[in-house]
Image: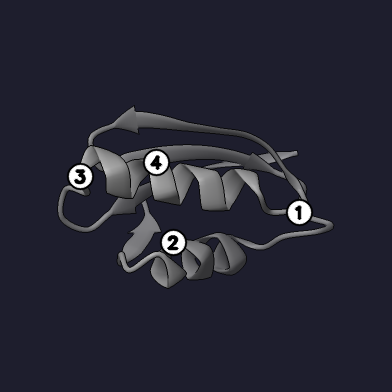
């Protein structure tokens, strides 16, 4: 399992952050997803199933820009 800290551009509302967390948790291959700050998410994922780009794309699909920290 790999871990990555992702920063979300701007500060999502609590509802927006919940959408992001749910979308990441719903991905096959994530084992842990947690907010570590108002605009940060720590994701533990299986690199055999997902890439960091998959995670960033999922966040983008929720209407937010993001990048690795």
Q: Are marks 2 and 4 in contact (CB under 8 Å)?
A: no
Q: Earlier in the sequence, mark 2 or mark 3?
A: 3
Q: Earlier in the sequence, mark 1 or mark 4?
A: 4
* Residue 38 image position (x, y, % from top left): 23, 35
Q: Residues within 10 Å of mark 4 (few under 14, many from 20)?
A: few
Quadrant for residue 61, please give it: bottom left
Q: CA distance from mark 3 to mark 1?
A: 29 Å
Q: CA distance from mark 2 to mark 3?
A: 14 Å
Q: How many numbered dots are placed on residues in this image?
A: 4
- Which residue is the site of mark 3? 13
- Element type at marker 4? helix
Q: Which residue occupies 16% across, 48% down?
A: 11
Q: Which mark is residue 18?
A: 4
Q: Which residue occupies 76% across, 49% down?
A: 29
Q: CA distance from mark 1 to mark 4?
A: 24 Å
* Residue 43 image position (x, y, % from top left): 55, 40
* Residue 53 image position (x, y, % from top left): 56, 69
Q: Residues within 10 Å of mark 1 (few under 14, many from 20)?
A: few
Q: Residues within 10 Å of mark 2 (few under 14, many from 20)?
A: many
Position of the N terminus by quadrant:
top right
């Amino acid at each position: 399992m790999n871990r990555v800290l992702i920063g979300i551009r701007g500060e999502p509302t609590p509802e927006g952050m919940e959408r992001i967390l749910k979308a990441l948790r719903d991905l096959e291959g994530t084992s842990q997803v947690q907010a570590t700050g108002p605009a940060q998410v720590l994701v533990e994922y299986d690199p055999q199933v997902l890439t960091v780009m998959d995670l960033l794309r999922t966040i983008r699909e929720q209407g937010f820009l993001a990048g690795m920290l």
